Image (cartoon, rainbow, N blue to C red):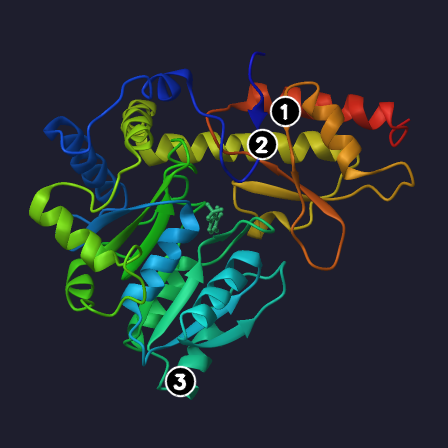
Amino acid sequence: MSYPILLTPGPLTTSRRTKEAMLSDWGSWDASFNDVTASVCKDIVDIVNGQGTHVCVPMQGSGTFSVEAALGTLVPKTGKVLVPANGAYCQRIARILLYLNREAVILEHGEDEPANPDRIEAALKADPSITHVAVVHCETSAGILNPLHDIALVVARYHRRLIVDAMSSFAAIPIDLATTPIDALIAASGKCLEGVPGMGFVVVRQEVLESSSGQAHSLALDLHDQWAYMLKTGQWRYTPPTHVVAALRAALDQYHEEGGIAARSARYQKNCAALVAGMRTLGLRTYLSDDVQAPIIVTFHSPDHPNFQFVKLYEGVKAQGFILYPGKLTKIETFRVGCIGAIDTQHIFKAVEATERTLRDLGVLS
Ligand SMILES: *Cc1c(COP(=O)(O)O)cnc(C)c1O
């Protein structure tokens, strides 16, 4: 193997073709580059069935820049946001709202517990001043799947706006904007679309975006201004991440050739099942129960053995070509292994073997 396989929550392993798409330089004024941007945005809207209701606004930066752009642009300064929280990315939304001076109500859940639509309903009923709900679809910190469709129906029934961080689920888990009412869906190039990192995007209900002019707290992260400028000129407002956009175009072509959402989600589910089964044969235990595990990233309990240290496992597995990820839970020792990116079960089998070899070398397995 000439390059490492990333079993992480992003950036992810990309195909050679996606990497090769970055070998040309593009002028930001050039019509052919603007055509690439437009086609990328069109495909992104189509993937979640938002044609005719939603538009895609791309944004420079990592995924968090787009989360901050969406919250800052779409939530008015007088708004109040309910955040069902079961992990670090939910906490990041809460933290962004604090920076933005937008009022937030945090609905705490356990990190192994999906966001509960009944509790969300009770919170909305109890507080009519809540204007928005902001949820994370797949909470990548533990790898839990939140019940987006049921949450969206509750939020719509109470006539509040819904903003969704779908960073690690977009293009991996089906989302249908025609049947699941969502005002804004946020994701990024370097996750399950299997592009390289460097841009995010917000798929936003056009009428909601149109009514948000002048609300943003920040010039660079003003989603409305970015959209209005692009509508008028076809260009990005400020220097675009040209190579990232070109790579994303190539990654989208491969997404379609693979068979779209059905094929990609099936591949990730197979990866996840192979990973969980393989690690369990080594005696490793998953943190989440199988019914709430998203096929994105799996959290494992660290083995309860005096010789176990995550950095040693990391180094041993890395020497065999695979990059693991530390845990992100507040209370217990865990580590994480991703199932997403341009990888299949062959890579997963090899990664499990590499884990086994390393744990034996460390004396954790006999
Ligand atoms: C990756 C991710 C983000 C964005 O993180 P960045 O480091 O800014 O790219 C946000 N939310 C979730 C759920 C994620 O998985």
Q: Most extreme residue toward the left, as rendered?
A: 232
* Label number found at residue 322: 1
How far separated are the C-alphas under marks 2 and 1? 7 Å
Residue displayed at 76% across by 50% down: 333
Q: CA distance from mark 3 to mark 1?
A: 48 Å
Q: What amino acid type is highlighted by mark number 1?
A: Phe
Going by the numbered disc 2, the residue's amino acid type is Leu
- Left or right: 82, with 335 as reference point: left
Is 67 placed above or below 42 here?
below
- Quick check: can you spot residue 75? yes
Q: Are marks 2 and 1 in contact (CB under 8 Å)?
A: yes
Is 84 situated above or below 46?
Answer: below
Q: Are marks 2 and 3 in contact (CB under 8 Å)?
A: no
- In the image, is the residue at mark 1 within 8 Å of ligand 1 by its beta carbon? no
Label 2 crowding class (10 Å Cα cut-off): few <14, some 14-19, many 20+? many
Percent across and percent down for residue 288 are: 65, 51
Q: Secondary structure at mark 1?
A: strand
Query: Percent position (x, y) of residue 317?
Result: 71, 25
47 vs 250, nearest the viewer: 250
Image-based side of 105 in relation to 305, left or right: left
Q: Which residue is mark 3?
A: 125
Q: The disc labelled 3 sits on which kind of residue?
A: Lys
2 or 3: tag closer to the N-terminus: 2
Residue with the mark numbered 2 = 7
Quadrant where the N terminus is found in the figure: top right
Disc 1 residue crowd, few under 14, some 14–19, many 20+, Cα 10 Å: many
Q: Position of residue 205 (x, y in %)?
A: 21, 59
